[in-house]
Amino acid sequence: MTEIFDAIKKSAIEIRNLIQTGDTGKSTQENSTGDTQLKLDIASDEIIENIFKELKSVKAIVSEEQENIVSLHKEGKYLIAYDPLDGSSLVDVNLSVGSIFGIYENDFTGKNLVAAVYVVYGPRVELVIATDEVKMYRLINNEFKFIQNIKLNEKGKLNAPGSTQNCWAPFHKKLIDDIFEDGYRLRYSGGMVPDLHQILLKGGGLFSYPGTTDRPKGKLRQLFEVFPFAYIYEKANGQAVDGFQRVLDIQTTHIHDTSPCFFGSNEEINRVLKVYKENGK
Ligand code: F6P
């Protein structure tokens, strides 16, 4: 898998350069969920696809920006699902964005995920790789240097609640309000990668993107966003659930399926599970 991690590092350097100098305008295309693609989304996707094409160990790839799975090398062992530039519209307001990668064996299901990686493009470029451990690297003089292992505490202090309050179920709103009442601080930029990175580095808390009245199955995509971060949070001593079960146990029926999701340290996730069990359906 080292060659895959090296390829991701290479793509991150190219995407960082693209973010700094590229055109942030809209393209004339839409992705499979109907979002208008930015030129940056398309260009980042091409960078990653071209780099993965060279790797014999990669059997197939699927991008959040593309409709279908792309077959690469028949004998390859790994399947990779990736979101080339998550939160790309935030580049225009100069906030952090990220790339997310899930590495699978056999098929694209949560239980077959064998590693996950994300890159945060912020004031610094940082890359996190989760296999059995979660390791963070930082881009220094064009090379990724190991900085630290990441482990969540049992309980944190940050609360990152996604979507809009008028679309939340009343019990979900009460859960979030109660968490704030208990002294948690609001930290939500609208970029999943920097928001989850912050919780990981500050030791814990809760990021939630529930099922809502406008999107009962949530907004975030299983293969490209939810599963890779679930893997990372679990390996970092935290949890990732859909309110009722581990997200990695969810059956995926389509590559672009979404799912409600909650990522956090153990105490916050146990609290979510309790509230959803009492109120949810
Ligand atoms: O997937 C897109 C995304 O931009 C995520 O990075 C982010 O967590 C989420 O959408 C924010 O959505 P909302 O603005 O509805 O909270």
Image (tube, rainbow, N blue to C red):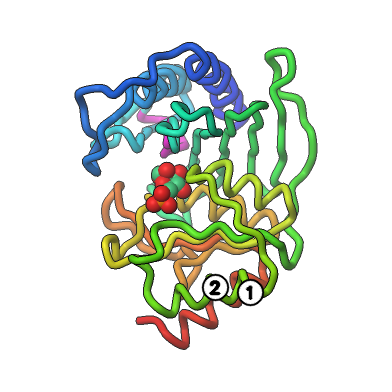
Res. 68 image quadrant: top left
Nearer to me, 235 or 200: 200
Residue at mark 2 to residue at mark 1: CA–CA distance: 6 Å
Q: Is residue 187 left or right of residue 19?
A: right
Q: Position of residue 165 (x, y in %)?
A: 40, 64
Tell me the residue at 60%/57% (across/down): 186
Indicate the amino acid at tag 2: Asp
Residue beneath disc 1 = 181
Labelled pair 2, 1 in contact (Cβ < 8 Å): yes
Local crowd at mark 2 within 10 Å, few (<14), some, or many (≥20)? few
Q: Quadrant of the C terminus?
A: bottom left
Give the answer, above or below, for where 175 lies relative to 163. below
Q: Which amino acid does the dot numbered 1 rest on?
A: Glu
Q: In the rendered image, which residue does mark 2 sit on?
A: 177
Instruction: Tell me, yes or no, whether the highlighted magenta stretch contains residue 52.
Output: no
From what the image shows, is residue 238 above or below residue 197? below
Q: Position of residue 122 (x, y in %)?
A: 61, 30
Magenta-highlighted residues: 74-84
